[in-house]
Image (tube, rainbow, N blue to C red):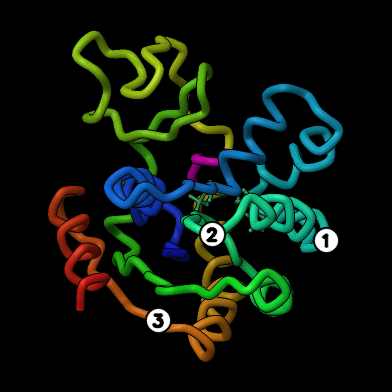
Amino acid sequence: MNVVLAGPPGSGKGTQAALLAQSRGLRHISTGELLRQAVASGTDLGRRVEGLLERGDLVPDDLMMAIIRDCLAGGGGWLFDGFPRTVAQAEGLLPMLAELGQLVDAVLVLDVPDDEIVRRVVGRLSCGGCGLVTAQDRLGADGGCPRCGSRELRVRADDREPTVRNRLAVYRAQTQPALAALGRRFPLRMVDGRGAAAAVAQRIAGVLEA
Ligand code: ADP
């Protein structure tokens, strides 16, 4: 199964993607996390994209498509978290899929009102060890990263209020049309993203079984 999981920044997309990848045995491909790791390790790519990420602007489509081509080459069974984000990315994805004989089984879009988004994003932390982005109430018992245990947790550079507003605006202007374009080719499903992570995960499971 191949799934695109989308939603505005702070919609819980990263959390749900991790849960869904685990329960279905899918490769979780978070483009945001790939980019943040590139910045953290100071690669060429990281140096090119650092300023864009900090402002909440999108990384150029040609760079993203090169990254995605490598991911798709690993075969089916993937879950995209954060891709596609522009109409050009959605349109670039289609011939790559056709070439590889892959399909998208579902495009899931988490739907969360803006006031809940702002509340969620303000409280979240990013792990300096593995890059995981998590809510403060999901830390391990010792206050460490729930995935790798690192205590190096900080607010993501792009989780400050003006940047969050910019990311929301970018989502409306560029990502919603991209999802609509992809949804004309593959099944597009809106999922209510409000409430506890477990409740949202159940809704997603229900949508995938329907
Ligand atoms: P969020 O969805 O909460 O904004 P992500 O971790 O998905 O967080 O993305 C963080 C940042 O990484 C984005 O604001 C953007 O700068 C960059 N990015 C991630 N995916 C893409 C993409 N497909 N195209 C362009 N830029 C991207």
CA distance for labels 3 and 1 = 25 Å
Rendered-image quadrant of the N terminus: bottom left
Q: Earlier in the sequence, mark 2 or mark 3?
A: 2
Tell me if 29 is positioned left or right of 150 in this view.
right
Residue type highlighted by circle 1: Asp
Dot 2 corresponds to which residue? 76
Of 12 and 64, which appears nearest the observer? 64
Range covered by the magenta-colored residues = 158-162
**Which SS does the magenta portion mostly show?**
loop
Cα distance, mark 2 to mark 1?
A: 22 Å
Q: Secondary structure at mark 3?
A: strand
Amino acid on which disc 3 is placed:
Leu
Name which residue type carries label 2: Gly
Neighbor class of circle 1 (other Cα within 10 Å; few <14, some 14-19, many 20+) is few
Q: Alpha-carbon distance for marks 2 and 3?
A: 19 Å
> Which circle marks residue 62 in the picture?
1
Q: Looking at the picture, how far across and down is residue 118, in whole percent?
A: 36, 51
Mark 3 sits near ligand 1, with its Cβ under 8 Å away: no
Q: In front: mark 2 or mark 3? A: 2
